[in-house]
Amino acid sequence: MGARIVLVTASELPAPDDELPVARAAAERAGLTADVAAWDDPAVEWASYDAALIRSTWNYPSHLDRFVAWADAVGAATRLVNSPAIVRWNSVKTYLGDLAAAGVPTVPTTYLAPGESIALPGYDDFVVKPTVGGGARGARRFRTADAAAAPDHVAALHQQGFTAMVQPYQAGVDRDGERALLYFGGEFSHAIVKGAVLSPVTGVRGEESHPNVRPYEPTAAEHTIARAALAAAPEIPLYGRLDLVLGDAGTPIVMEAELIEPNLFLGYSAGADDRLITALNDLLAG
């Protein structure tokens, strides 16, 4: 008899998770019993499952302390994937500093915590966003003409309890797109490239979180940097999405390491859903 797993979502989602039924069908093809449950549903008996696979817990930025406590509790009751240690590390984007300290090329980042003076770097084109968030929520792009409004955005993030992060806007996103490399069980699965999320006109996210997605074949340099980022995590995650962009020098740098609840773009590579479940099965088999 196959293992019993649960795919973890949230009680309220900003958008439907189209990958949930795909992953569930793959699990059932592999002989697993797969349920779907919300992390913030207190009635779920997590210990009744052999594994809990985090998928679309997309409301956690508004409930970070509760979410981390949930991960610790579920990790003690069953196998949480990815692990509580990864959840704790990856849920706050200060992890980019850890990547940089490990020698992984990353987008330069300045952090401004609540209570600190709002002193912005002198970039001509930059992004301000919260250190806890996803899908470009709370992110805004500023250029010289509207840079005077940036301190107000930082102050608004502070009022919500968030530390703000400031990064130079990566023109490579507009020119070459943002690459996302997916690894399952430590092995490369597939990759996509997508267009810019932040509008050059309004500076905020457009209607699409992932515009103009298409399959992509990564370069050797991109693989090297993505694997280095995975190796810098507290442990090798079962699944990981590494978002890269070509920097000003034309070499890839890490924008984000998505190790908790990213879209895995399962529909852009034949067999990606089965590779994800195979990696989970291998983990359960020890």
Image (tube, rainbow, N blue to C red):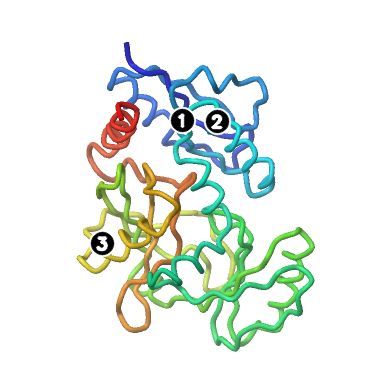
- To which residue does mark 2 refer? 76
Q: Quadrant of residue 281?
A: top left
Amino acid type at mark 1: Arg
Which x, y percent locates residue 285? 30, 26
Residue drawn 33% across the image and 84% down it: 249
Please rate how many residues cluster around mark 3, counting C-alpha atoms within 10 Å: few if below 14, some from 14 to 19, many from 20: some
Numbered disc in front, either 3 or 1 = 1
Please rate how many residues cluster around mark 1, counting C-alpha atoms within 10 Å: few if below 14, some from 14 to 19, many from 20: many
- To which residue does mark 3 refer? 223
Amino acid type at mark 2: Ala
Q: Mark 3: which secondary structure? A: helix
Q: Specify which label sits upstream in the sequence, 3 or 1.
A: 1
Residue drawn 64% across the image and 49% down it: 61
Q: Mark 1: which secondary structure? A: strand
Amino acid type at mark 3: His
Query: Relative to 144, does residue 162 appear above or below in the rendering?
Result: above
Q: Quadrant of residue 163?
A: bottom right
Q: How many marks on residues?
A: 3
Q: Mark 2: which secondary structure? A: helix
Which x, y percent locates residue 204? 59, 66
Q: Is residue 57 visible?
A: yes
Cα separation, mark 3 vs mark 1, equals 28 Å
Q: Is residue 202 visible?
A: no
- To which residue does mark 1 refer? 79
